[in-house]
Image (tube, rainbow, N blue to C red):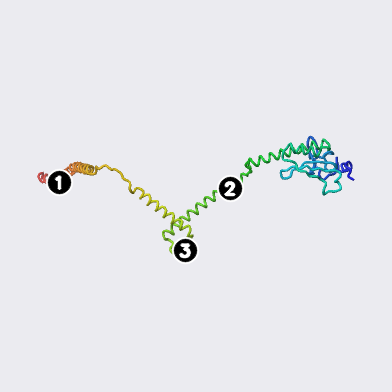
């Protein structure tokens, strides 16, 4: 026979219990970690071990179940708890609880309803969060961010160097500096050749794009050529007019110098 008072005297109050957890709070200092506890508080009315007639609510994969324990099944641990699935509708689920616990103590019936309402509310919140799809905020350390930025910069520099080296080598291969080397990447070399051919095709298409177009031009070619010839003749005449007196002056200076040189010894002779 199961004696509830004897069990509570052994595990309750200040005695040892494996499910008991002590904490400093305002209401109580003892909590129960048993999964079948109705309120989570270590007390005589809510202890699932010291009560032969007990009921609680549990949630499994989004579905609520009502668990009932009676004194008649105490000798059969495999069939100790009676499990009944509750409806997803809140009102119908409360009606089910009232029907199953109609002759049970009011305290157990009321606490089962309170537990069911709390579970129902957090299930609704869970569904809303899943539908909303909020972004998960992940904290990152500053050291890790600095490392990542440094690595990105190094990777960019390495990529630029590799592309520059690749272009230089392909240009040399294209020019024929390496005659007897065959261990180069044919795919990249063919890619460069295709790019060059595409550019040539684009240039040819641009040159041929104006073919067939008609434009109108004014015919002033003879008039312009006559004007250009007249301007050139005027410029030549001005140059000759400017250069002519300069030459005459030089000639005059030379003649005067020669006359002075010739006249010098004759005057000396006359004086003697």
Residues at badges 2 and 1 in contact (C-beta under 8 Å)? no
Outermost residue toward the bottom in this view: 180
Q: Residue 63: percent from the left, percent from the top?
A: 73, 43
Disc 2 target residue: 148
Helix, strand or loop for disc 1:
helix
**Pointer 3 or 1: first along the chain:** 3
Measured Cα–Cα span from mark 2 to mark 1: 94 Å
Helix, strand or loop for disc 3:
loop
In the figure, residue 228 lies in which quadrant? top left
In the figure, residue 111 lies in which quadrant? top right
Residues at badges 3 and 2 in contact (C-beta under 8 Å)? no
**Pointer 3 or 2: first along the chain:** 2
Q: Residue 250: percent from the left, percent from the top?
A: 18, 44
- Numbered badge on residue 93: none
Q: Residues within 10 Å of mark 1 (few under 14, many from 20)?
A: few
Q: Nearer the viewer, residue 39 or 113?
A: 113
Left or right position of 245 against 10: left
Disc 3 target residue: 182
Q: Closer to the observer: label 3 or label 1?
A: 3
Q: Residue 261: percent from the left, percent from the top?
A: 15, 46
Left or right position of 181 against 44: left
Q: Nearer the viewer, residue 255 or 184?
A: 184
Measured Cα–Cα span from mark 3 to mark 2: 39 Å
**What residue do we see at 44% from left, 64% from top?**
180
Q: Closer to the observer: label 3 or label 2?
A: 3
Q: Residues within 10 Å of mark 2 (few under 14, many from 20)?
A: few
Disc 1 target residue: 258
Q: Residue 176: percent from the left, percent from the top?
A: 42, 61
Measured Cα–Cα span from mark 3 to mark 1: 85 Å
Left or right position of 260 against 111: left
Left or right position of 101 against 134: right
Q: Residues within 10 Å of mark 3 (few under 14, many from 20)?
A: few
């Amino acid at each position: 026979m199961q004696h509830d008072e004897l069990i509570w005297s052994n595990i309750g109050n200040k005695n040892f219990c494996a499910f008991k957890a002590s904490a400093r709070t305002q209401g109580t200092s003892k909590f129960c970690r048993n999964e079948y506890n109705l309120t989570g508080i270590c007390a005589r009315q809510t202890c699932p071990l010291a009560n032969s007639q007990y009921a609680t609510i549990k949630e499994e994969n989004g579905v609520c179940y009502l668990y009932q324990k009676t004194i008649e099944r105490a000798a059969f641990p495999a069939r100790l708890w009676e499990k009944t699935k509750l409806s997803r509708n809140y009102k119908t689920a409360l009606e089910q609880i009232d029907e199953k616990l109609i002759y049970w103590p009011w305290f157990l019936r009321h606490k089962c309803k309170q537990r069911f309402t709390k579970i129902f509310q957090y299930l609704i919140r869970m569904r809303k969060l899943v539908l909303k799809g909020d972004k998960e905020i992940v904290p990152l350390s500053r050291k890790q961010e600095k490392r990542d930025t440094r690595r990105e910069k190094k990777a960019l520099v390495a990529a630029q160097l590799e592309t520059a080296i690749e272009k230089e080598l392909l240009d040399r291969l294209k020019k024929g500096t390496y005659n007897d080397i065959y261990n180069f990447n044919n795919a990249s070399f063919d890619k460069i050749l295709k790019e060059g051919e595409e550019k040539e095709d684009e240039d040819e298409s641009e040159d041929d794009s104006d073919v067939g177009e008609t434009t109108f031009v004014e015919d002033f070619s003879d008039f312009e050529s006559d004007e250009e010839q007249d301007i050139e003749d005027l410029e030549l005449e001005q140059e000759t007019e400017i250069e002519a007196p300069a030459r005459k002056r030089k000639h005059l200076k030379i003649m005067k110098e020669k006359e002075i040189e010739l006249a010098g010894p004759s005057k000396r002779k006359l004086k003697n």
